[in-house]
Image (cartoon, coloured by chain):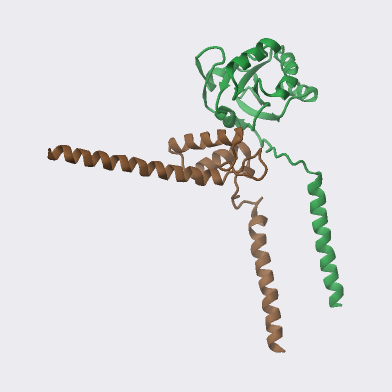
Amino acid sequence: MKNKFNLFIIITFISFCFVIFYKGLNNSNTYAPKINGEKNIPTFEAKGFKSNTYYSAKKIFEEDIFYIVNIWASWCVPCKIEHPLLMKLSKDQSVKLIGINYRDNLNNAKNFINEFGNPYSQILIDPDGTLSIEFGAYGVPETFIINKNKKIIRKFIGPINKKIVEEIKLIIK
Amino acid sequence: MKILKVCIVLIFCMGFNHLESGEKSNELKNKILKNIRCLICQGQSVYDSESDFASSIKLIVDKKINEGMQEELIYEFLREKYGDWIIYNPEFTKNTFILWLLPLLLFLTGGAIIYKKILKKNEK
């Protein structure tokens, strides 16, 4: 009786471990926190891309429209992949794209914009990555949607694709 | 001459005082950085990592300490941006209570089993 009970305990324990590890195998190993509800946009002052002027968050997000904040760099290959989609999005009048140039060489960034086009209504430079951290970014590319109440409502880690563009269009409608 | 000597001593004291506060803020910075997970690295803290993400976090933590922000508020700031996962030492919440209580429960169960066995052995 005792042996049977011990066997039952061992089998239950092994089955429990198996289920946990099997479930773990199917999980993605990249961690991305869920945005629970809306988050405030950070307060910041950042240098503009084309001039030496500093812009505050209040000045950047002053209009009563949706904003898309895209973090990019000229050295980032996925940024080149998503760029045509950002160009398409920029044609939508109901949204403004704000670019944050992440840890980049300014000349290379300017060449990137000259070569592939400028989808952004404003580009801010983030030479040490701290502005991106204030937004809660991991690296490049990353895209945030800010609603009319100046709240971050959605975050996309990695390059945006056609499916994400459709989702963005639905949100900003 | 006396006044000059007093001034020199005062300047020295102020200099050392500054060094001491610098050391303290450095200690605090290192303590915080060791308790922050580098989210894009494999099992490394921000303190150990040289990645872009880690170096930006180091700058942010340094900035927040210089602004006079308390340790707990810095963790809170990071938790708000990146979730609980960024902190190595999770808080006792409804999501983490099993994590905190399970080792204690296992320890007590193990202890009880050992105690029972010893009692049985002594009885024999």
In the displayed structure, does residue B124 sit left or right of residue A45?
Answer: right
In the displayed structure, does residue B96 sit left or right of residue A60?
Answer: right
In the rendered image, the vertical position of residue B116 relative to residue B85, given as above or below: below
> Quarter of the image containing the C terminus of chain A?
top right
In the displayed structure, does residue A145 sit left or right of residue A6?
Answer: left
In the rendered image, the vertical position of residue B115 relative to residue B25, given as above or below: below
- Chain B is shown in which shade? brown
**Which residue is farthest left?**
B1
Q: Report x, y in % for residue A68.
A: 66, 21
> Quarter of the image containing the N terminus of chain A?
bottom right
Taking the image as drawn, is residue A167 in sight?
yes
Q: For this rendering, which residue is in front, A39 or A1? A: A1
Q: How many marks?
A: 0
Q: Which image quarter: residue A100?
A: top right
Q: Which chain is green?
A: A
Residue at x 63% of width, y 28% of height:
A152
Residue at x 22% of width, y 39% of height:
B8
Q: For this rendering, which residue is in front, A117 or B115? A: A117
